[in-house]
Amino acid sequence: MRKKGTLFFVIGLLLILGGLGLVIYNFATDAKAGKTDKVVLERIRSIVPKPVPIKEADDYIMDSMEVPDFLRDPLRDMPTVEVDGNKYIGIVSIDSIALELPVLSECSTSNLRIAPCRFTGSVYQDNMVIAGHNYSSHFGKIPDLKMGDIVTFADVEGNLFTFEVTEIEIVGATDVEYMTVGDWDLTLFTCTWGGAKRVTIRCDRIMESKD
């Protein structure tokens, strides 16, 4: 009887240590990702033009300015810049939660450990979906977003797109296809702790008012 009790104690201790090791690993991975993001952001800023808020096509013409390529051809592929062998399409920023992150062009398990990734769509076609891990340095704070919060996305050509949070949803962990359903201009999503649910932030694009 005593041997069985000792066995259960050892198994329990091993489970606790395993759980603790996993927590430590997650914290270390989170910290590493945060440091990488800062380096990548600086590299991207050194390569791309300073972001400028976009206008309607007619406004460019009225102001005698060249109409940006994405307005003339919204179906074009989003351009990328390469940093350390990884291709990025731009930077997503959310001031209300002090978030600024590079966004990778393609989504994969390995890429998600580096930075948020374009899951599908294009900012030029008003249907982009961005996925991110729930690291505190990545999308771990997006559950704190509120209706009306502002999200911006700057592409690598210096075009700055502005969005407003218009819906916040909690969906099942397997509802990945649901991210592309609906008529939202931008969607951000991440898993909750434990991975049981997905936090989904839906946004509509807004334009700066013309003076």
Image: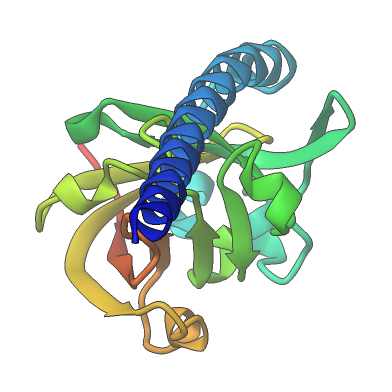
- Image color mode: rainbow
Determine whether, in the image, residue 115 is placed left or right of residue 168. Answer: right
Which residue is situated farthest in the right direction here? Answer: 85
Residue 189: x and y in percent read: 40, 62
Determine whether, in the image, residue 199 is placed left or right of residue 122. Answer: left
Residue 141 visible (yes or no): yes
Would you identify the image quadrant in which residue 201 lies? bottom left
Q: Nearer the viewer, residue 94 or 123?
A: 94
Quadrant where the N terminus lies?
bottom left
Residue 43: x and y in percent read: 70, 14
Residue 64 visible (yes or no): no
Q: Nearer the viewer, residue 7 or 161?
A: 7
Quadrant where the C terminus lies?
top left
Q: Nearer the viewer, residue 119 or 50?
A: 119
Determine whether, in the image, residue 179 is placed left or right of residue 61. Answer: left
Residue at x 23%, y 74% (from the top left corner): 170
Determine whether, in the image, residue 150 is placed left or right of residue 31. Answer: left
Would you identify the image quadrant in which residue 121 lies? bottom right
- Residue 104's place in the image compared with 58, above or below, is above
Q: Nearer the viewer, residue 46 or 74?
A: 46
- Residue 33's place in the image compared with 126, above or below, is above
Residue at x 18%, y 33% (from the top left corner): 96
- Residue 203's place in the image compared with 140, above or below, is below
Residue at x 45%, y 53% (from the top left corner): 7
Residue at x 49%, y 82% (from the top left corner): 180
In this rendering, the count of numbered labels is 0
Residue 186: x and y in percent read: 41, 64
